[in-house]
Amino acid sequence: MSETPGGTYGLVFLGDIMGEPGMAAVRQGIPVILAQEQPLFLVVNAENAAPSGKGLLPAQAEELYALGVDAITLGNHAFDEPAIEPYLNLGKPIIRPANAPMNAPGRGRTSVTKDGITLHLINLCGQVFMKEWEDPFRAALGLVKACDSPHILVDFHAEATSEKIAMGWHLDGQVSLVVGTHTHVATADEQILPGGTAYQTDVGMSGPHGGVIGMDRSAVLAKFTKTSLVRFRVHDGPGMIHGVRVDVDRVTGRAQAIRRLTWST
Ligand SMILES: [Fe+2]
Ligand SMILES: [Fe+2]
């Protein structure tokens, strides 16, 4: 499994899993993706996987590991479900943004070793429209320096395309992949940067289609049109998975290919 001609291995990353429709999609879709892609590593962003669509509960995290997920990243919703706080300190392969306030539970970097490859994972939040996070650019350099392997995945969870593109250039040649999350909309700019870092501004959402970035569209429209007081809820629609597959050189840790993945029921 996993080794491809040319001395590379496959890495699959799936975007923000959203509510129960997102969990239902990965329940069905991950076995298919694993069979088709044969990746060495499968990493998912699960910051919205709780039934509320905001945060993650231990039950969903455990189910994701059982499905074959090697590591979980989070984002600005990392701490929305209080029950996840002790779970983040159990030493499991789950990370929240590293540039969180100093007393936040959990950690922002972890690593997973399989088939002789140690993959480091780093989670960072952007600052544009999310001022509460520390400087992700400075944090990134320190975190990368602490990695004892060239195989590094960075999930940059940010709103602005400009901030994410800048992070790609900031880390080009130092990491295997910089992938953006948070907007829930996949971008068409997947590429290998000149230094060998795979990059995509946003990988998109694994969640319900037909809503507004995963939320029920009637509630979101009522908010924008100010027609009624509303409480957001996860959209009840068929699930779809968005992700990315990257081929990484086993020796150098630099990327050789990147391809968008989609899966739907
Ligand atoms: Fe999200
Ligand atoms: Fe987010």
Image (tube, rainbow, N blue to C red):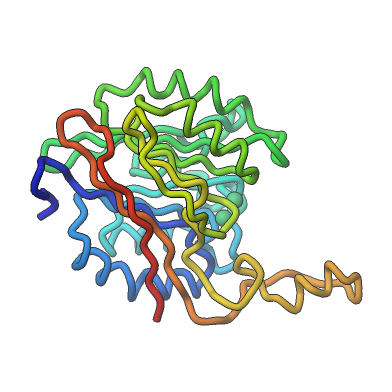
Tell me residue 157's x, y (percent).
55, 43
Tell me residue 96's x, y (percent).
49, 40
Looking at the rendered image, the quarter that the N terminus falls into is bottom left
Q: Please tell me which residue is depicted at 70% across the width and 76% down the height of the picture.
A: 217
- Image height of 125 relative to 33, above or below: above
Q: Spot the residue most to the front.
A: 194
Q: How many numbered marks appear?
A: 0
Q: Is residue 264 left or right of residue 257?
A: right
Q: Is residue 113 left or right of residue 194?
A: left
Say which quarter of the image contains residue 125.
top right
Which of 262/103 is in front?
262
Which of 171/181 is in front?
171
Q: Please tell me which residue is depicted at 47% across the width and 65% down the height of the picture.
A: 206
Say which quarter of the image contains residue 233.
bottom right
Q: Please tell me which residue is depicted at 34% across the width and 48% down the height of the picture.
A: 71
Tell me residue 179's x, y (percent).
44, 44
Looking at the rendered image, the quarter that the C terminus falls into is bottom left
Tell me residue 135's x, y (percent).
61, 25
- Image height of 134 relative to 157, above or below: above
Q: Please tell me which residue is depicted at 69% across the width and 37% down the height of the picture.
A: 128
